[in-house]
Image (spheres, rainbow, N blue to C red):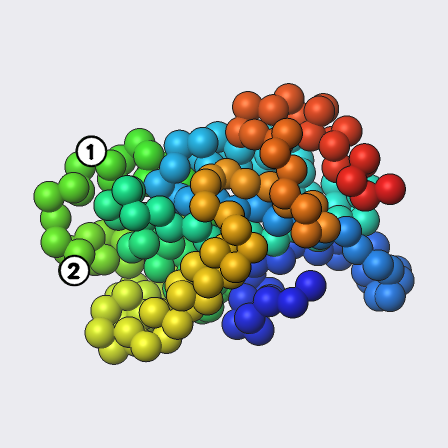
Amino acid sequence: MSIKTAFAQSHILKPTSLLKANPETPLNTLELYLDYACRFSLKIFQRWTDGGFFTDDFLTTHKLQIRFNHVPQPWHSRSSLIHNVALAVARYKPEAFWDYSLQLFKDAKETWDDNFNNSTPNEFNNVLAEHAHKYTGIDKVLVADYLGDKEASTRMADLKYFVRYHRTVGVHVTPTVAINGIICGNIESSTDLDKVVEIIKQQTL
């Protein structure tokens, strides 16, 4: 699966055991298009996490790799800033990206929507840098530099890459699920997990 090399390790979950046994195994690709500030994105990510969809066993069973795609939506005022801190973690501590994403989803909905709407972007970036340090151990200054002016060109290019990607494939709402390049309109945040597995099987035969 093609992706900007900086995010190959962080944004694509692969069936490690399967590929270790046979590196040439062809894989199916499931893409998740998500917005950290969208409560339905939180719902699907939480349910799929709890259901074991992101585990090596599940990925191996279905010969599946899963890609995370960022879809910051302008009607969520803090969305882009939250995506930026996720991309900072992806760059500097890629192995923490998926676990940290779940924490971001939770706090974006339960905490920041209500408590930080009156802060400036710089103030909120400081909150995010501290958040990343708290949950991943990543250096706070490193994240703050990425979110601030020092690494502005890198930060903007990173987010712009994902925005261009989802616009190119025509995704504008979250969550959206695609399997092997085909958008699955019958998978929503509330779709029963057994039904999701059934759809995955149908689309990967």
Q: Nearer the viewer, residue 144 or 168?
A: 168
Query: Disc 1 residue type?
Result: Asp
User: In the rendered view of the protein, which quadrant contains the C terminus?
Assistant: top right
- For residue 70, side relative to residue 134 (left or right): right
Say whether residue 128 is left or right of residue 168: left
Residue 52 lies, with reference to residue 25, above or below; the image says: above
Residue under numbered circle 2: 122
Which label belongs to residue 100?
none
Question: Which residue is pictured at 45% across the width and 41% down the height?
Answer: 173
Residue 7 sits above or below residue 102 on the image: below
Q: Do the residues labelled 1 and 2 touch (CB within 8 Å)?
A: no
Q: Earlier in the sequence, mark 1 or mark 2?
A: 1
Residue at 84% across, 59% down: 26
Q: What kind of residue is marked 2?
A: Asn
The residue tagged 1 is 114
Give the position of the N terminus as an image quadrant. Answer: bottom right
> Which residue is drawn at the image coordinates 69% and 30% (left, top)?
196
Residue 138: horizontal and vertical position, in percent? 39, 62
Real-space CA distance between mark 1 and mark 2, rounded to the nearest whole angstrom: 18 Å
Q: Where is residue 37 in the image (x, y as percent from the top left)?
A: 35, 41
For residue 186, say whether it is visible: yes
Number of numbered callouts drawn: 2
